[in-house]
């Protein structure tokens, strides 16, 4: 049984090496919550709340996550020990949404449990490969700068590149990239910048052989995405629109997507993410692991998730050095020949650089 003895929440803050821009926001600095849980046997696990400082991507923020973890979720888990980390998300059923806060503690319990079992987390959840393919997202709307970054990432070996598009910054941008990189596995993410009235404009992207177009329409839509998918040859991938298992079932029924981006934070934990993977696998729908400009703790869970057999498309799974001068984990995550090796150590398989965390920490509380 896993009974919670103590949880330490630390707000950390770090500038990005270079700004990351999308249709909604330009991110220059990253705040997140690092969570450390210790159980009654003195075993620890780490999690990371991936909400941003402001609610531009989802409604959650660093502050809402802090509140939910401290005042609602940790007290709920303390009421009764869990036998297995799969039980944690069920324990939170009485709490609506707040998925990133839930995922922070749920993943930490997975890490702790895998350490207790002396097994790498990815093996514990049924990982099917010991390397995952690395993909990367480019966050620049400046064509010359994006081309420069893509060239550097291709040199580093990344197997798939994602760029950000929005109305007025789409066809010409994609055309230039395709011209410069004819064989590149390329995709575009719109972060819900279009409406169904833009369908003819999106249809023009069909000729550039994109792997997929991610979240073109509203963040809470599945109906219009289905209408759009009927008009496009390029597969539609959903991100923001799929938050629950029920969302995915409904969207599958409608035909709203042909590919799914799964993010542990967005869907409320590793177990909910695994269930979405299983659902898509049963319908022959490929999935990939999304990114949140995250620190190494969250990145490590992404690696474990992406080892599952249905993750057949390289995700937004990049090295620690993609965004950070120095990451908070040891060793850092590195890309070699376009792949990241899964660790053989127990839990997520990474250590926390505590001295460094202290340096970049702006607030901490133990509950
Ligand atoms: O490489 C990454 O971390 C993902 C980059 C990215 O596209 C993204 C980053 C932050 C929030 C949302 C998104 C997204 O996938 O829409
Ligand atoms: Mg996205």
Image (cartoon, rainbow, N blue to C red):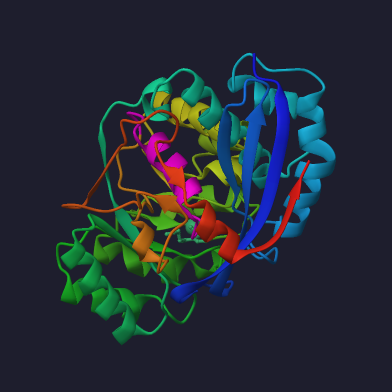
- How many numbered circles does the render carry? 0
Q: Is residue 20 visible?
A: yes
User: What is the quadrant of residue 364 in the picture?
Assistant: bottom right
| Left or right: where 154 falls relative to 200 | left
231 relative to 180, above or below: above
334 relative to 168, above or below: above
Tell me where residue 286 appears, x and y as whole percent.
Answer: 36, 37
Tell me where residue 197 appears, x and y as whole percent.
Answer: 55, 68
| Left or right: where 104 falls relative to 345 | right
| Left or right: where 30 falls relative to 3 | left
User: What is the quadrant of residue 62 in the picture?
Assistant: bottom right
Q: In this orientation, which residue lies closer to the viewer: 180 or 55?
A: 55
Q: In this orientation, which residue lies closer to the viewer: 46 or 335?
A: 46
Q: In this orientation, which residue lies closer to the viewer: 233 or 97?
A: 97
* Residue located 34% across and 26% down the image: 127
Quarter of the N terminus within the rendering: top right
* Residue located 83% across and 38% down the image: 72
Instruction: Provide the residue span drawn in magenta.
Output: 291-310
* Residue located 64% across and 31% down the image: 38
Q: Is residue 267 magenta?
A: no
Q: Is residue 260 visible?
A: no
């Amino acid at each position: 049984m896993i009974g919670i003895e103590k949880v330490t929440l630390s707000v950390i803050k770090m500038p990005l090496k270079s700004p990351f821009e999308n249709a909604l926001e330009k991110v220059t600095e990253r705040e997140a919550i690092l969570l450390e849980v210790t159980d009654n046997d003195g075993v620890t696990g780490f999690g990371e709340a991936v909400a941003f400082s402001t609610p531009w991507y989802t409604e959650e923020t660093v502050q809402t996550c802090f509140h939910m973890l401290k005042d609602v979720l940790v007290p709920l888990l303390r009421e009764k020990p869990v036998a297995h980390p799969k039980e944690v998300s069920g324990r939170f059923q009485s709490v609506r949404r707040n998925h990133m806060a839930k995922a922070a503690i749920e993943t930490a319990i997975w890490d702790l449990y895998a350490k207790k079992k002396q097994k790498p987390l990815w093996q514990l959840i049924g990982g099917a490969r010991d390397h995952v393919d690395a993909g990367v997202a480019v966050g620049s709307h400046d064509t010359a700068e994006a081309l420069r970054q893509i060239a550097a990432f291709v040199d580093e070996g990344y197997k798939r590149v994602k760029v950000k598009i929005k109305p007025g910054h789409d066809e010409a941008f994609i055309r230039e990239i395709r011209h410069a990189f004819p064989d590149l596995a390329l995709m575009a993410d719109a972060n819900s910048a279009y409406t169904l009235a833009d369908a003819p404009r999106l249809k023009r992207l069909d000729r550039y052989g994109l792997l997929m177009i991610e979240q073109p329409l509203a963040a809470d839509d599945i109906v219009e995405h289905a209408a759009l998918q009927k008009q496009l040859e390029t597969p539609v991938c959903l991100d923001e629109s799929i938050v629950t298992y029920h969302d995915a079932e409904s969207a599958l029924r409608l035909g709203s997507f042909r590919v799914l981006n799964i993010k542990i934070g967005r869907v409320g934990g590793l177990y909910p993410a695994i269930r979405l993977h299983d659902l898509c696998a049963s319908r022959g729908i490929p999935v990939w692991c999304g990114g949140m400009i995250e620190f190494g703790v969250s990145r490590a869970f992404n690696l474990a998730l992406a080892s599952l057999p249905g993750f057949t498309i390289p995700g937004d799974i990049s090295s620690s050095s993609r965004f950070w001068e120095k990451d908070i984990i040891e060793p850092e995550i590195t890309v070699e020949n376009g792949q990241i090796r899964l660790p053989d150590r127990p839990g997520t398989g990474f250590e926390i650089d505590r001295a460094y965390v202290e340096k970049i920490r702006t607030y901490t509380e133990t509950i």
